[in-house]
Amino acid sequence: MSAETALYAVLAAYAPLTALVSTRIYPDAIPEDKALPAVVYSSESATPEVCLNNSIVATATRFRIAAWGTTRTAAAAVGDQIVAALIATGVPYDNRASGFDPEVGQFADITEITWWG
């Protein structure tokens, strides 16, 4: 199972998160005309851990997970559930920040993680 597939499975299986976003958990971008709130995840990098014999023992995949909402409060509520889903499965988060896209008037709560696989 790829890191992306595993991350999606964790998010989609967490009932408090899906109570807020239903099935609106997307890779890379929210499809046009989809409702908010929603979650978008993207892989920022994948760094292999290479042994002296050139075998790869693990890969650290850096993900950016953005909770999008029409208000900062709505985005933060989804972001809280993203963090809770990750912590429940033993995945700590590296960073959390807020954002705003003035072109579409949407707020973001962004969580960054390193997924080892």
Image: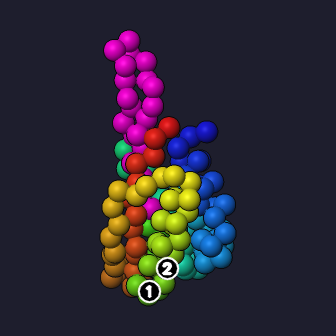
Q: Which residues are magenta?
A: 46-65
Q: Position of residue 71 (x, y in %)?
A: 44, 87
Name the main secondary structure of what is drawn in magenta. strand
- Residue at 60% x, 71% y: name it: 17
Q: Which mark is residue 112?
A: none
- Residue at 53% x, 44% y: name it: 3
Count how many numbered circles sit on residues in the image.
2
Where does label 1 land, which residue? 73
**Mark 1: few/some/many CA within 10 Å (<14, 14-19, 20+):** few
Q: Does 87 sit above or below residue 32? A: above
Q: Residue 53 sits in which quadrant?
A: top left
> Which residue type carries mark 1?
Thr
Q: Which quarter shows the N terminus?
A: top right
Q: Secondary structure at mark 1?
A: helix
Colouring rule applied to residues: rainbow
The answer to whether 72 appears left or right of 27 in the picture is left
CB of mark 2 within 8 Å of CB of mark 1?
yes
**Mark 2: few/some/many CA within 10 Å (<14, 14-19, 20+):** some
Q: Residue 100 sits in which quadrant?
A: bottom left
Q: Position of residue 6 (x, y in %)?
A: 58, 47
The answer to whether 48 appears left or right of 5 in the picture is left
Q: Residue 45 sits in which quadrant?
A: top left
Q: Which mark is residue 77?
A: 2
